[in-house]
Image (tube, coloured by chain):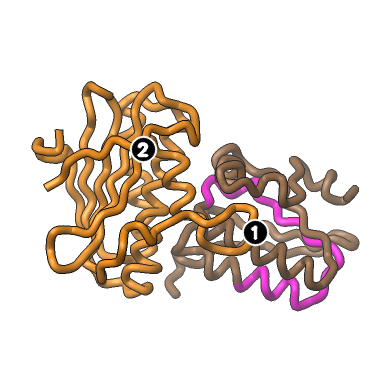
């Protein structure tokens, strides 16, 4: 996999919450590397995962599929998955796919901590 | 209208890393045509989904196959943009290309739904050649509502 197909993703623990912060566009090219990170995060049996999308200006259905997989992993392990800070273009694809009511979506990380 | 040559023709290989370049070009072109920012993003997304479908399903992720893109800037009746994307993959029944039931929440299968939802016209056809499928999509200026689309009118293609 070449470097431009690797999505930079930071993972850090904030109290009980694992915060995953991808940085950049998520499309067919980069979704596989994002999927690997998400799978690794859930392998560690977290109780709550927040995916901070403030730095994701664009996502296609490959990215959405990766997040749906994340939601399924969360459901299987009885963890909470929260999406944070969706930019307008990203929010738009969730609305078109009618997934905006399926995911827990908040504007800020502080709100995710309250859930 | 489709008797006229396209305003823009591109050929690319089926490499996922090229999708962002196509999106940038489409964003720039749709802004010039007069679509608002949201519509420009939506049109780029629809084209991205069409290309991703070809790479994933048509070419089964082989990254050295040809994809042909033709773009018409429609000036009137109605004004907007028409995009034709063709591949050279195995032909399938166009009627089998359907968006899935959105109540069934699972990964994948959203691309066709997104394309049909965003664009005012979206149709799949077999190419006249022995191999390959094509998708033709249109977005018209001033027809903003998602899902309230005119999809019955089929432009004639060569």
How packed mark 2 is, by other alpha carbons closer than 10 Å (few <14, some 14-19, many 20 or more), is: some
| Magenta-colored stretch includes residue A63 | no
Residue B3 position by quadrant: top left
Foreground of the two, A21 or A82: A82
Instruction: Classify mark 1: residues with Cα within 10 Å, few (<14), some (14-19) or many (20+).
Output: some
What span is colored magenta in the figure? Answer: A36-59
Q: Would you identify the image quadrant in which residue B66 lies?
A: bottom left
Upstream in the sequence, badge 1 or badge 2?
1
> In the drawing, does residue A43 fall left or right of residue A6?
right
Q: Where is residue A48 in the image (x, y as percent from the top left)?
A: 83, 62
Q: In which quarter of the image is the N terminus of chain A?
A: bottom left
- The residue shown at (82%, 64%) is A13
The disc label shown at residue B116, or none: none
Front disc: 1 or 2: 2
Element assignment for label 1? loop
Figure chain in orange: B
The picture's colour for chain A is brown
Residue under circle 1?
B105
């Amino acid at each position: 996999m070449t470097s431009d197909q690797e999505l930079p993703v930071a993972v850090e623990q904030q109290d009980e919450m694992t915060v995953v912060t991808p940085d950049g566009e998520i499309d067919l090219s980069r979704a596989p590397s994002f999927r690997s990170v998400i799978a690794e995060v859930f392998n560690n049996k977290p109780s709550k995962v927040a995916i901070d999308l403030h730095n994701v200006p664009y996502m296609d259905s490959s990215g959405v599929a990766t997040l749906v997989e994340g939601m399924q992993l969360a459901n299987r392990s009885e963890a909470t998955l929260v999406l944070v800070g969706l930019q307008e273009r990203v929010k738009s694809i969730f609305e078109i796919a009618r997934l905006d009511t399926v995911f827990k979506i908040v504007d800020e990380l502080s709100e995710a901590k309250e859930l | 209208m489709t008797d006229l040559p396209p305003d823009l023709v591109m050929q690319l290989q089926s490499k996922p890393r090229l999708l962002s370049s196509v999106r940038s070009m489409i964003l720039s072109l749709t802004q010039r045509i007069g679509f608002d920012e949201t519509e420009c993003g939506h049109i780029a997304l629809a084209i991205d989904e069409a290309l991703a479908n070809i790479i994933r399903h048509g070419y089964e992720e082989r990254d050295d196959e040809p994809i042909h893109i033709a773009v018409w800037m429609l000036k009137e009746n109605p004004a907007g943009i028409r995009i034709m994307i063709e591949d050279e993959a195995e032909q399938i029944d166009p009627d089998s290309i359907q968006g899935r039931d959105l109540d069934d929440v699972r990964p994948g299968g959203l691309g066709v739904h997104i394309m049909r939802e965003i664009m005012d016209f979206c149709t799949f056809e077999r190419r006249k050649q022995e191999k390959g499928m094509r998708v033709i999509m249109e977005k018209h200026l001033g027809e903003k509502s998602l899902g309230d689309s005119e999809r019955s009118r089929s432009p004639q293609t060569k």
